[in-house]
Amino acid sequence: MAISGSFLCTSFKQELLVGTHNFTNSSGNSFKIALYTSSATLNASTTAYTTSNEVSASGTGYTAAGNTLTNVTPTTSSTTAFTDFADTTWSSSSITARGALIYNDTQSDKAVAVLDFGSDKSSSSGDFTIQFPAASASAAIIRLA
């Protein structure tokens, strides 16, 4: 199988209702993003970070388990609550990735969201950057409407 679209993971939605995830900047959980090849099986039913088909960490500028994300404080606009993350970069890297998994490193690596890049994206001895959308009710990576 492959990465099959971009989703908030189903388990994440349930975990929000029982208070598992805390996105508060000062006292919240630590969130990470890991990169995956086109062979990875990631979808809405993904429940946790996995090393299966993660981008190779050998000499590429990529570290297993990915980058720690800087959270944007959760807020609301009209009837939508949202949070987002600052862009993240793997510097001087040689990476080819088809997608990514955002997960909660503090809470047993529980999955938050699957990102499908739509095609392989690569860097060659350069920066591999994930640019998150604007932190707004209509664009943020995590929105509850």
Image (cartoon, rainbow, N blue to C red):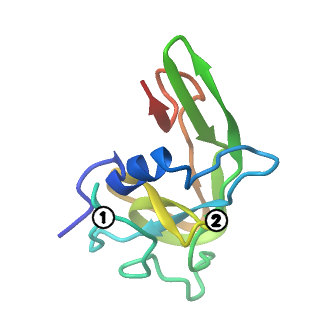
Q: Position of residue 125 (x, y in %)?
A: 60, 70
Tell me the residue that label 1 is attached to. 42
Tell me the residue that label 2 is attached to. 67
Tell me the quarter of the image containing the C terminus: top left
Q: Amino acid at mark 1?
A: Leu
Q: Position of residue 110 (x, y in %)?
A: 48, 65
Taking the image as shown, residue 104 lies to the left or right of residue 13, namely right
**Residue occupying the point 64% across, 66% down:** 106
Crowding at mark 1 (Cα within 10 Å: few <14, some 14-19, many 20+)? many
Q: Is residue 53 above or below residue 21?
A: below
Crowding at mark 2 (Cα within 10 Å: few <14, some 14-19, many 20+)? some
Question: Which numbered dot is residue 134?
Answer: none
Q: Amino acid at mark 2?
A: Asn
Residue 67's quadrant in the figure? bottom right
Q: Among all residues in the image, which is located at the extreme right?
A: 26
Q: Secondary structure at mark 1?
A: loop
Q: Position of residue 52 (x, y in %)?
A: 37, 81
Tell me the quarter of the image containing the N terminus: bottom left
Q: Secondary structure at mark 2?
A: strand
Q: Among all residues in the image, which is located at the extreme bottom?
A: 58
Taking the image as shown, residue 86 lies to the left or right of residue 57, namely right
**Residue occupying the point 59% across, 38% down:** 84
Q: Among all residues in the image, which is located at the extreme top?
A: 78
Q: Position of residue 137 (x, y in %)?
A: 51, 21
* Residue nearer the viewer, 85 or 105: 105
* Residue nearer the viewer, 40 or 22: 22
Disc nearer the start of the sequence (2/1): 1
